[in-house]
Image (spheres, helix red, strand yellow):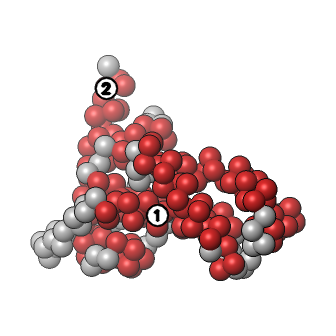
Amino acid sequence: MSKTHHILIAKCQKNDEKAMMQIYDLYCDAMFNVACRYLNDEESKDAMQEGFLKAFANINNYKPDYAFGAWLKRIIINTCLDIIKKRQIEFSDVEVERIAILDVSDWQFDTSISKVDILKAIEKLKPKYKIVVNLYLAEGYDHEEISNILDIPIKTSRTHLRRGKLQLQKLLKTIYNEARY
């Protein structure tokens, strides 16, 4: 993090509104993109605003050992998840003994499918799968962290990821076949 960032954060910790606006301007686009992975555009704007307010209210808890952007991103994600929980999306416990665990590290897609197509396909997943896929793929959380964040068993996280991956593969196959014709 640059010296300028450190200075701005120190000013924010002293409730300097101008510094807060500068931090907001620096990070708003990236945080909006993060929020859009979980919510629709309008909700994303609200979540982003609320997340920034939480961040500024708790800025004295920020420790420079971590990248400020990562700290802020975690707040935005948690704000999005709070909104989703208010909608009461059920992350059902499922019987997983009969489900074969696939290699969850294998997320290779046909190279002719663009990143944009993959992101659009993720948007079409069932909400409970979309959230787990985003937390796993985009945010890099492991199943134990996802379990804690969503308050679900680890097995449920794994199952939702597996099912989300299967749905995603089907959606991308459809996109690929449509693009060929």
Q: Quadrant of the N terminus?
A: bottom right
- Spot occupied by residue 5 in the image (x, y as percentages of width and height): 80, 63
Q: Which of the marked residues, 1 or 2, is nearer the chain's N terminus?
A: 1
Dot 2 corresponds to which residue? 178
Q: Quadrant of residue 83?
A: bottom left
Asked whether residue 169 appears in the rendered view, the answer is no
Q: Quadrant of residue 67?
A: bottom right
Mark 1 residue type: Thr
Q: Quadrant of the C terminus?
A: top left
What label sits on residue 79 in the rendered view? Answer: 1
Q: Residue at x 26, y 51 (%)?
A: 126
Which of 162/19 is in front?
19
Alpha carbon of mark 1 to alpha carbon of mark 2: how far? 36 Å
- Spot occupied by residue 108 in the image (x, y as percentages of width and height): 42, 51
Q: Quadrant of residue 127?
A: bottom left
Q: Residue at x 44, y 43 (%)?
A: 42
Asked whether residue 176 appears in the rendered view, the answer is yes
Mark 2 residue type: Glu
